[in-house]
Amino acid sequence: MKKLMNLGCAMCIIAFAFTACSKDDPEPLTIGLQAQYETPNCKVLDIKPTIANGTAAKYKWSCGDSIYSTDEVFTFITAEVG
């Protein structure tokens, strides 16, 4: 019975040590982008996000399954209305 109690105490201490040493959750990213942008036809629009807490941010500008850019600044131009 004493061995079982010692084993239980040891397991509790080990479990506590693992939970106490776990990484803290990272701060959530805050991305500053407008909900929509307007630009005249054939004018270049550079979209650059303002990211707080994103020191190692990776960029992917996409729509559906199509990836348009992986650069920080997305350069958009349209020749058609809509």
Image: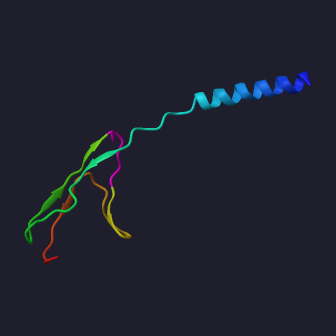
Left or right: 27, with 9 as reference point = left
Question: Which region is colored magenta?
Answer: 53-59
Estimate the x, y position of residue 21 in percent, counting from the top left.
58, 28
Estimate the x, y position of residue 32 in percent, counting from the top left.
24, 49
Left or right: 66, with 32 as reference point = right
User: In the depicted view, which residue is nearer to us: 61 or 53?
Assistant: 53
Residue at left offset 49%, top offset 34%: 24
Residue at left offset 39%, top offset 38%: 27
User: In the depicted view, which residue is nearer to us: 51 or 75?
Assistant: 51
Q: Is residue 9 above or below residue 50?
A: above
Q: Is residue 81 above or below residue 22?
A: below
Estimate the x, y position of residue 50 in percent, counting from the top left.
23, 46
Q: Is residue 29 above or below residue 73?
A: above
Report if residue 56 lies within the magenta region: yes
Q: Quadrant of the N terminus?
A: top right
Q: How many marks?
A: 0
Residue at left offset 89%, top offset 24%: 3
Left or right: 34, with 65 as reference point = left
Q: Quadrant of residue 9?
A: top right
Report if residue 3 lies within the magenta region: no
The main secondary structure of the magenta stretch is loop
Estimate the x, y position of residue 72 in percent, counting from the top left.
26, 51
Q: Is residue 1 above or below residue 24?
A: above
User: In the rendered view, how is the structure colored?
Assistant: rainbow
Residue at left offset 35%, top offset 44%: 29
